[in-house]
Amino acid sequence: MEKVAALTGASRGIGAHLAEALSHAGYKLAIGSRDHETLVHMAHELTTEVLPFPLDVTDLDSIQSFADATIHQFGRVDLVINNAGVGIFKRLDELRRPDFRKIFSVNVEGAWLVSRAFLPELQRSRGTLVMMSSDVSTRTFETGGAYCASKFALRAITRTLQIEHPGIRVLELRPGATDTYFADSLPGAPGKEWFLSPKDVADTLLSVLSLPDNVRVEEVVVRSREQTPEF
Ligand code: NJP
């Protein structure tokens, strides 16, 4: 039986590489993000059955439609990955309220609502839920106040889901600096030479998913060898 994965934030960066790696591993996929045109193009390139869906994780109706369409097309869900995320880095005395709200709406509330929409199906399949968190979900730095707070909050939600739904495997995946479009940057931009590639992060998750079904990996931190270990 082919497994089915639902993935948010699939249009670029880590999400696009996850879609490729999961399809390569045989997963049927529901891929969601706001850039539907790119998702449709990706669906043509991938080798398994793919549902490209226009998803905005700040919109509850959009999230419910994504979950409904996924179940309608595939009849089951084995893996849900909350990968959609935004980063805005400013000192707390300079950060604007709309930016703070956007970070929490996408990174925290969006991940919670997507999880909630898929929980009944994940319980049925005894599936796996992945939160794309961050190595900064336990520390902070200047200009990181709002973003780090959002990942601390996502970590708390992950831990709570682990307790409330022991039949589901819930993983907090915590990448360090990764070379994507994150925080309005461009892949390969100067200064990012030592960053993890998004493929490194996708491969890390695929290696966890390749473990036997009775193994529950609850947290993974993955960083470039060039990134100073910080706790
Ligand atoms: O970022 P980027 P990454 N509704 O900007 C989507 C975490 N992380 O791949 O809607 C639905 O290339 C957006 O799609 P679109 C980070 O916190 C990263 O690096 O079409 N989707 C795009 O596909 C995040 O959770 C680093 O614009 C929405 C994707 O999100 C995850 O990794 C370090 C959306 C972002 O792609 C992936 O980020 C770390 C919405 N409202 C954690 N808003 C790092 N890169 O260094 C955005 O510790 N998206």
Image (cartoon, rainbow, N blue to C red):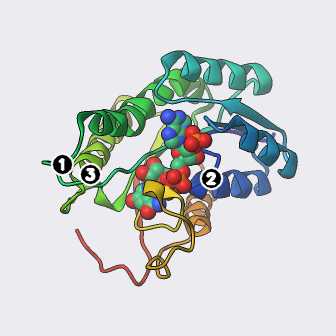
x, y (%) of residue 138? 23, 56
Please, what is the three-letter code of the amino acid marked with disc 2?
Answer: Arg
Which marked residue is nearer to the observer: mark 2 or mark 3? 2
Label 3 and label 1: CA atoms lie apart by 16 Å
Label 3–label 1 contact, CB within 8 A: no
Residue occupied by mark 1:
94
At 64% from the left and 54% from the top, the residue drawn is 18
Q: Is mark 2 within 8 Å of ligand 1?
A: yes
At 38% from the left and 51% from the top, the residue drawn is 87
x, y (%) of residue 123? 54, 27
Left or right of 53? Residue 34 is left
Q: Is residue 32 above or below residue 205?
A: above
Number of the label disc, if any, that sits on residue 103: none
Dot 2: element: loop
Question: Can residue 174 be seen at all in this image of the molecule?
Answer: no
Residue occupied by mark 3:
148
Please, what is the three-letter code of the amino acid marked with disc 3?
Answer: Cys
